[in-house]
Image (tube, grey):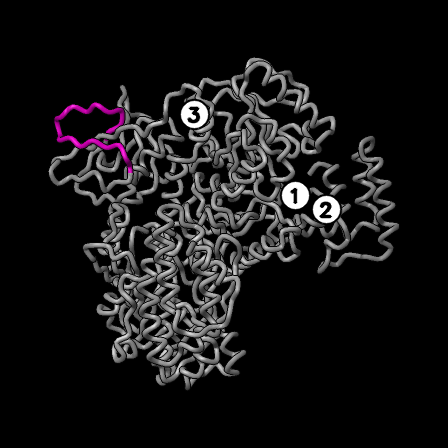
């Protein structure tokens, strides 16, 4: 450690040392003496270091440093990480002048002729000037750039003016939205084009600068830096977090504790690289609990190599509720082959379902305990996704296209598949988009070619091989020789992608994922199946694998589960391929295929019940997942008490605004003062017909069969009515204070989030059935008094405002729905009545 950094570290506030044997007496005199040392540091650094080491007054501070040092892991040797034969080809012969930070500069520099513009540099010989939201720039000369009217700010404006006078396009790119939109908005207004990583900030820019085009742009990765060469296998449980602790973001800190505690309490080797280790600001100090795992910050290039020794990484998103914005680490670490544990982020959940969100500490270890082959699939999909869609070349292509620059578009190279049976070879089930199939002996006209033989190839197989050519300069990519390392041989041409050329001497071998996968074997098959889990599936194969099924497969009670997937006429080829793979490899999972889509989860759930053979039933949607021990707690309760018809827990809901636990337990306790219900009709009335998630409950199958309780076919919103019917007919129920599943309410593909004119047609079907239930069982008065006005305003009207196409039809359907209740008295609501009158004009 440099002596200056060491002294600075000693100046950390005393509050940081809570929990350690630190002398807090005479703090003021200690600080004065320390300042004396600091004033002499530049002239007599080694003498000062020696004096401090001898000074008893600072022995406790020094002891703290020794504690940290003693607990620090000695960093792995990274000299064995070879990066020769990287793919060094450039793409765009454009000279881009840029002001940015170190991370973005290093991510972009291989995609074009990139020139960093320091504060004293003149603008000369560039094609584009890009100003990126930065606090001080790559070299620190732009410190204070956001202070409008300051000398630094004015120097920036001068450079922008020079560019405009020379007809050099000026771009502003913000990677700090939405949190710091106001800080950088004045700089943005000086540009001719605005890019932002946050879709939600686009209207803000458009309102303020209607004359400036605004466009979305994602973080780029550099395949020369962010690649999986020499990454460790996932059987190695080394875990790393490289980042900072920021106390001002309290929700981020709470999420961080969940992640860190989950790792600390599991068998793993954990390292925290503290980016702000040498800052003397208390707001950046990690809690004392994590000190044994901390190492000081290291150079960026070393950190990139260090990640190869840690196949698992932790990620913290400061911005959680953005449709497109997340921490840059999500991109970089996926490209490098890390399996990520992360806190929630709306964009990450929608786009990268293979990243494991953590809401309960226990789920970290449970995920570790999954077969490594399942986790290897996830990280291989992450690598190919980054290499095929998020490289710096894709980034620069988008920028240059916006400027109407003439460039050659990026295309996925053609791959020729050579096979002995063309008629049986359907290449369309591969996710790779540009494939030609020929027979042996026919001419190969593409640069890349492979052989399909007797192996079983999964949908991602070719994309997995081709993605490696993005980061290595090789004659062939193969599988089964070694894992993410160079080789001069291949064992099987049926597992190899070749590049046309004069030799095949330089090769690279990746994991043998997506080919000849082995069946998933249960630990035991002797246990009696107790619980049927019914999962409706429609065009969401990736979320099904990485959210829903992963949470089931990692559950310790897996041997007691009967899993039933009902394919509701999926048309997406990847989802169909996934279901076929599940049928082939998971013999304990039933897959039921329906020919045509119903447009509602009702039919597949009803049909799933017909296939259930266990005494108990629950439901789980493919884009949701179980968390913690909730489902285990439910199963234990209903199994141990045969008098129970239904047992219900809580649900965690995350959406585009917040994370909230729906405490059904607390609501019932507040009204009924007991968690054991013997009069469910009374409970429904007293609780105002409040419903719980049907994915947070277990019900006796016999209750559903005996009372012919089914979901309304063709409807949406049917879950609530289904719950009311179950609870109404149940003789006894138990409500427990345990959170069962997370409901990802902001999933873009969810039927309740695809608001079209037909949305209200389907709700009209449900409301017709709801009225029948409420009238028949004498709940209508309760519903109208407690639920009707609130539901109409806060559910239907808010969604009606989101309809863009054919809104007139949507309004007509909603008004039909609303007027179904005209004959039932309800409390007066002027706001609702005014809204209805406005719609009827």
- Foreground disc of the pair 2, 3: 3
- Disc 3 crowd rating (10 Å Cα; few below 14, some 14-19, many 20+) is few
List the residue tagged with mark 1.
276
- Disc 1 crowd rating (10 Å Cα; few below 14, some 14-19, many 20+) is some
Q: In the image shown, does 655 or 688 lie closer to the viewer? A: 688
Report how far apart the C-alphas of labels 3 and 1 lie in the structure: 38 Å
Residue 441 shown in magenta: yes
Mark 3 and 1 residues: CB-CB less than 8 Å, in contact?
no
What's drawn in magenta, residue-wise? 432-449
List the residue tagged with mark 2.
281
**Residue 94 seen by the camera:** yes
- x, y percent for residue 469: 35, 30
Q: In the image shown, does 460 or 121 lie closer to the viewer? A: 121
- Judged left or right of residue 691, residue 765 is left
- Would you place residue 675 above or below residue 480 in this image? below
- Judged left or right of residue 707, residue 751 is right
| Residue at 35% across, 61% down | 816
Mark 2 and 1 residues: CB-CB less than 8 Å, in contact?
yes
Point out which mark residue 492 bears. none
| Residue at 40% across, 60% down | 625
């Amino acid at each position: 450690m440099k002596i200056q950094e060491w002294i600075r570290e000693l100046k950390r506030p005393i509050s940081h040392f809570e929990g350690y044997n630190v002398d807090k007496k005479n703090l003021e005199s200690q600080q004065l003496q320390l300042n004396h040392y600091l004033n002499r540091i530049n002239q007599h650094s080694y003498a000062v270091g020696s004096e401090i080491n001898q000074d008893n007054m600072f022995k406790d501070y020094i002891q703290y440093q020794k504690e940290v040092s003693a607990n620090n892991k000695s960093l792995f040797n990274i000299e064995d990480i070879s990066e020769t034969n990287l793919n060094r080809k450039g793409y765009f012969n454009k000279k881009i002048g840029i002001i940015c930070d170190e991370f973005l500069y290093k991510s972009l520099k291989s995609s074009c002729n990139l020139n960093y513009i320091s504060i004293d540099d003149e603008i000369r010989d560039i094609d584009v000037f890009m100003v990126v939201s930065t606090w001080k720039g790559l070299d620190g000369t732009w410190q204070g750039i956001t202070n409008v009217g300051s000398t630094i700010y004015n120097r920036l404006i001068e450079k922008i003016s020079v560019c405009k006078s020379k007809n050099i396009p000026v771009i502003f790119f913000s990677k700090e939205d939405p949190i710091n939109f106001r800080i950088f908005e004045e700089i943005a207004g000086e540009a001719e084009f605005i890019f932002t990583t946050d879709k939600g900030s686009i209207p803000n820019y458009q309102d303020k600068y209607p004359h400036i085009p605004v466009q979305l742009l994602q973080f780029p990765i550099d395949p020369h830096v962010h690649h999986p060469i020499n990454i460790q296998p996932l059987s190695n449980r080394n875990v790393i977090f490289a980042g900072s602790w920021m106390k001002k973001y309290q929700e981020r800190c709470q999420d961080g504790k969940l992640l860190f505690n989950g790792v600390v309490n599991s068998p793993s080797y954990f390292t925290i690289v503290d980016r702000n280790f040498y800052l003397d600001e208390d707001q950046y100090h990690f809690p004392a609990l994590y000190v044994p795992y901390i190492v000081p910050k290291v150079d960026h290039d070393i950190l990139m190599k260090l990640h190869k020794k840690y196949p698992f990484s932790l990620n913290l998103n400061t911005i959680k509720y953005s449709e497109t914005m997340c921490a840059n680490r999500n991109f970089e670490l996926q490209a490098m082959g890390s399996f990520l544990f992360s806190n929630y982020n709306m964009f990450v959940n929608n786009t990268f379902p293979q990243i494991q969100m953590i809401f309960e500490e226990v789920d970290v270890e449970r995920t570790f305990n999954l077969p490594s082959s399942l986790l290897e699939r996830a990280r291989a999909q992450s690598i190919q996704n980054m290499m095929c869609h998020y490289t710096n070349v894709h980034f620069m292509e988008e920028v240059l296209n916006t400027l109407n620059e003439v460039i050659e578009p990026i295309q996925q190279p053609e791959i020729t598949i050579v096979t002995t049976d063309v008629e049986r070879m359907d290449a369309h089930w591969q996710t790779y988009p540009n494939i030609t199939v020929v027979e042996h002996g026919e001419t190969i006209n593409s640069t890349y070619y492979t052989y399909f033989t007797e192996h079983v190839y999964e949908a991602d197989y070719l994309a997995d091989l081709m993605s490696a050519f993005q980061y290595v300069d090789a004659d062939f990519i193969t599988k089964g020789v070694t894992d993410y390392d160079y080789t001069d041989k291949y064992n099987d041409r049926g597992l190899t992608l070749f590049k046309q050329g004069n030799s095949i001497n330089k090769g690279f071998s990746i994991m043998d994922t997506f080919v000849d996968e082995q069946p998933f074997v249960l630990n035991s098959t002797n246990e009696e199946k107790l619980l049927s889990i019914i999962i409706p599936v429609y065009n969401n194969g990736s979320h099904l694998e990485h959210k829903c099924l992963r949470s089931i497969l990692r559950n310790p009670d897996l041997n007691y589960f009967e899993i039933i997937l009902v394919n509701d006429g999926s048309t997406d080829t990847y989802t169909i391929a996934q279901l076929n793979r599940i049928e082939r490899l998971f013999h304990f999972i039933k897959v039921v295929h329906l020919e045509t889509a119903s447009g509602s989860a009702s039919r597949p759930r009803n049909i799933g019940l017909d296939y259930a053979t266990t005494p108990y039933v629950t439901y789980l949607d493919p884009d949701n997942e179980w968390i913690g021990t909730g489902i285990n707690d439910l199963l234990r309760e209903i199994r141990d008490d045969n008098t129970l018809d239904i047992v219900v827990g809580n649900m965690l809901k995350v959406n585009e605004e917040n994370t909230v636990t729906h405490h059904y337990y607390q609501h019932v306790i507040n009204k009924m003062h007991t968690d054991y219900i013997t009069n469910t009709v009374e409970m429904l009335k007293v609780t105002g017909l409040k419903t719980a998630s049907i994915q947070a409950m277990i019900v006796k199958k016999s209750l559903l069969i005996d009372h012919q309780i089914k979901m309304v076919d063709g409807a949406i919103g049917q879950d609530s009515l289904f719950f009311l019917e179950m609870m109404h007919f149940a003789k006894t129920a138990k409500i427990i204070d345990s959170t069962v599943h997370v409901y990802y309410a902001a999933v873009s593909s969810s039927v309740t989030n695809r608001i079209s004119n037909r949305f209200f047609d389907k709700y009209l079907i449900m409301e017709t059935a709801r009225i029948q239930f409420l009238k028949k069982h004498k709940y209508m008065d309760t519903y109208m008094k407690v639920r009707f006005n609130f539901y109409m305003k806060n559910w239907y009207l808010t969604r009606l405002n989101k309809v863009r196409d054919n809104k007139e039809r949507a309004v007509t359907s909603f008004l039909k729905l609303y007027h179904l209740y005209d004959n039932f008295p309800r409390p007066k609501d002027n706001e609702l009545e005014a809204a209805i009158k406005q719609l009827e004009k």
